[in-house]
Amino acid sequence: MNNYPRWKVVFISLVALVGLFFSIPNFVSKEKQADLPDWWKPMTLGLDLQGGSSLLLQVDLDQVVREQLGAIMDATRIALREKSIRYTGLTVQDDSVFVKISNVEQITKAKDAVRKIDKGNLDVVESGKELTIKFTEQAILKMKKTAVEQSIEIVRRRIDQLGTREPSIMRQGSDRIQVQLPGIEDPNEVKKLLGKTAKMTFHFVDESVSLADARRGKIAPESKVVSGSDDASEAFYVIERKSIVGGEHLTDARADFQGTEAVVAFRFNSFGAKAFGKATRDGVGRRLAIVLDGKVITAPEVKSAITGGSGVITGNFTTESANELALMLRAGALPAPLQVVEERIVGPGLGTDSIAAGKSSCLIGLALVLIFVLATYGLFGLFADIALVLNLTLLCGVMSLLGATLTLPGIAGIALTLGMAVDANVLIYERMREEQALGKSVMDTVAAGFANASSAIFDSNLTSLFAGMILIWLGNGPVRGFGVTTCLGLITSVFTAVYVTKILILGWIKICKPTKIDV
């Protein structure tokens, strides 16, 4: 104990100073916080403290299945034609694709051809001349899980491009996504942004048939009728079902101007550029429809091959709508539409009241603990009090350094940490009393107190740390905020109670050279 390593003293002191340094922004005014560099900022306040908006979104998983069934129907048509199998009545109804094979002798051949479309994921049931094609239960579950995961990622990208600081985006249940936006008091812009799927495809217009004939059913199976958007020049278009390229191959999209007209400039990856270049080379003179979320936004004539992998989208855009479309195309298309099922707005006034109440509870709790420890252990209680105050500032510093978000339950975690922080000191001091009662010297008493109490301190805090980590792993929102502050508080409390207190006691012994300790 007399030869406590100098490097440990230096290391513990440096850790404490770094923690204190990063805690400083939390104790300055908001005006001064704005002038601080990005790497030296206070803790980020959660929705319940800062105010903002909370949206609960539901993923339309039925739409995902319907779209995949539509793709299976198109693939079935191609597969049967390749095998020269005649059929009628190819339709999608509910959760199945139905097709009637004209020649009963070709049923087995047709079933084999259909199964190969998506091997292992399709159930093909024969009933007379009719085949019923459905996805397996496992395939549907996987499809829905993937759709929700993709939706969360796309929502995150779109929110990030808005510049919202510290948004919280997490899955809730099997088909819902919770989006919390601190500081955003009007969520209408976000709702508008998230309410569009932004699924874009490029199709050639089928001008071999008139729109009137197409609407009477006189249309080839390879074509379909789609409506035009509000800004399109026509109400309906006849386009080829097969797209020449999709929006998933876009690498960039930006709002731009052609003269005074707002447009969206886009660029494809190598695969998209090759497919787009070949299609426009072969389709010079034809109209190319750009379809967004099932509606044609524009259908200009291809005047020459577009081989550079880039182009522009026109369509009576305003600057705002061009920026919005470009943002959604950069972020990617949602696999399914999202519906807002719950909307909650937290005013900044409520957050201010919560912060004030949280501060009051922490300060009152801190004051009571400080007084109790000082009254119980005297000078050694003062050492514990110094460590406790340092613990609070270190906790603020660590949360600021890690960019952790402070929520109202997080403040409760801090208050709980302050109450638990002196447990280690109580164990050490009570052990010192027992050692001193055995007639040991001052240095031996202190050494034995720290050595014999350490195992109990680390074991008890380790089990609490595991519980907090489970809260972070399995919890969300408020539960996770409580878990974060609790875990960080346990780490800082062990550091200050064991190591900082030890240095303070050793320094006192070295300076005062007492013959007995009053603990």
Image (cartoon, rainbow, N blue to C red):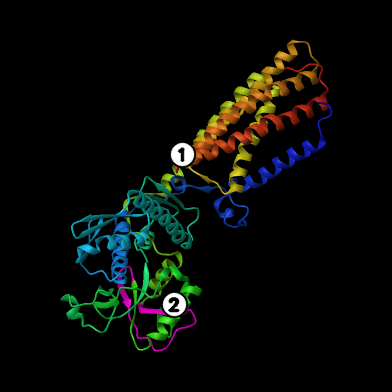
Disc 2 on helix, strand or loop?
helix
* Residues under numbered marks 1 and 2 in contact, where contact means CB atoms less than 8 Å apart: no
Residue visible at 63% across and 33% down in the picture: 493
User: Residue 51: x and y, percent?
Assistant: 43, 49
Residue 314 among those drawn in magenta: yes
Residue visible at 57% across and 56% down in the picture: 34
The Cα–Cα distance between marks 1 and 2, rounded to whole angstroms, is 49 Å
Q: Is residue 34 visible?
A: yes
- The foreground one among 95 and 374 is 95
User: Residue 430: x and y, percent?
Assistant: 67, 17
- Residue corresponding to mark 1: 479
- The foreground one among 236 and 7 is 236
- Label 1 or label 2, whichever comes before in sequence order: 2
Q: What stretch is highlighted in magenta?
A: 292-316
Label 2: few (<14), some or many (≥20) within 10 Å?
some
The answer to whether residue 489 is left or right of residue 8 is left
Label drawn at residue 275: 2
The answer to whether residue 27 is left or right of residue 431 is left
The quarter in which the N terminus is drawn is top right
Q: Which of marks 1 and 2 is in front?
A: 2
Residue visible at 49% across and 37% down in the picture: 471
Disc 1 on helix, strand or loop?
helix
Q: Can residue 519 be seen in this view?
A: no
Looking at the picture, which amino acid does disc 2 mark? Ala
